Image (spheres, rainbow, N blue to C red):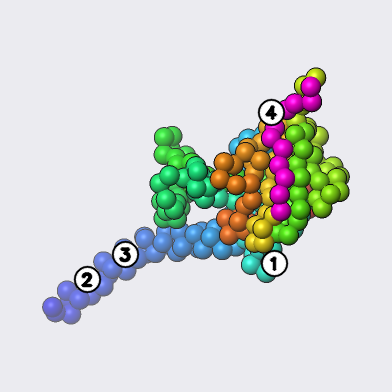
Amino acid sequence: MDALGTSMKREQVNKLWDFWGPIAMTLALYTGIRLYVAEARYIPSGSMLPGLQLKDRLIIEKLTYKRRPPRRGEIVVFNSPYSFDNKLNKAGKRSPLKCGLLNFPLIASINGLSDPSCDAYIKRVVAIGGDKVRITNRGQVFLNDTLITESYVSDFCNLDALGRSSCPPLRGNVPKGHVLVLGDNRNNSWDGRFWPGGAFLSEEEIIGRAFWRFWPISRFSSLSL
């Protein structure tokens, strides 16, 4: 190839890079930050009412739990039980690549493209590894035989005249490396009390800690207790 041909080819490559380079770098930066540092999430249900409202936008950071385990009272986002509960997940381990694509903003907005194993849930840690825990059919939490005060809960499960409830009680010891998560809206939350394969969430399934609400502006605030 002569010098002119080499120069033209180099120019074509440079033009392609000028167009695709910034796009590739933006995607790589977005993916890296989202995977390892922080990401934005929104509240899709009422399971965390009244503290978190539907459509609230939150920042989920992913650095804290690389240094320490979750603590009681923290709000965490974690992988769907349909990805780790062996009684819900019949298809085997979730595909990170598939879930990454389905959760990419442009793709996630397409109706009909969804997989329950790729969803994420948000709940509050109420017990950690080593805790002895008892949950009543009202959704009240006893830790190591002591009823804890939960100022963030205003809607416990309703009891009928016979003291029965649609919310199942729970009793057990939280294994090391696991936590128990519940929704603040105890009367309307699909959490560890209902998972058929077991109530306790492995810390490995936690995506990150919800620490800041950035939208709507009127509720812009930290989520720390």
Residue drawn at 77 percent across, 33 percent down: 138
Which of the two labelled residues, at mark 1 and mark 3, occupies the earlier sequence position? 3
| Segment colored magenta | 162-173
Name the main secondary structure of what is drawn in magenta. Answer: loop
* Circle 3 SS class: helix
Q: Position of residue 178 (x, y in %)?
A: 65, 57
Q: Looking at the picture, tell me which residue is in the foreground, 105 or 82.
A: 82
Q: Position of residue 44 (x, y in %)?
A: 60, 37
Which of the two labelled residues, at mark 3 and mark 2, occupies the earlier sequence position? 2
Q: Residues within 10 Å of mark 1 (few under 14, many from 20)?
A: few
Say if the magenta span includes residue 213.
no
When the figure is inspected, residue 65 is found, relative to residue 188, above or below; the finding is: below
The quarter holding residue 66 reads bottom right
Side of 136 where 85 appears, left or right: left
The quarter holding residue 122 reads top right
**Residues under numbered marks 2 and 4 in contact, where contact means CB atoms less than 8 Å apart:** no
* Disc on res. 166: 4
Give the amino acid at mark 1.
Arg
User: What is the spatial separation of the Cα atoms under label 3 and label 4, in whole angstroms?
Assistant: 64 Å
Name the residue beneath numbered marker 2: 8
**Residues under numbered marks 3 and 4 in contact, where contact means CB atoms less than 8 Å apart:** no
Give the amino acid at mark 2.
Met
Name the residue beneath numbered marker 3: 15
**Nearer mark to the viewer, of 1 and 3:** 1
User: What is the spatial separation of the Cα atoms under label 1 and label 3, in whole angstroms?
Assistant: 47 Å
Q: Position of residue 31 (x, y in %)?
A: 49, 59
**Residues under numbered marks 1 and 2 in contact, where contact means CB atoms less than 8 Å apart:** no
Work out whether residue 106 can be spotted. Answer: no
Which of the two labelled residues, at mark 1 and mark 2, occupies the earlier sequence position? 2
**Nearer mark to the viewer, of 2 and 4:** 4
Q: Looking at the picture, tell me which residue is in the foreground, 225 or 93.
A: 93
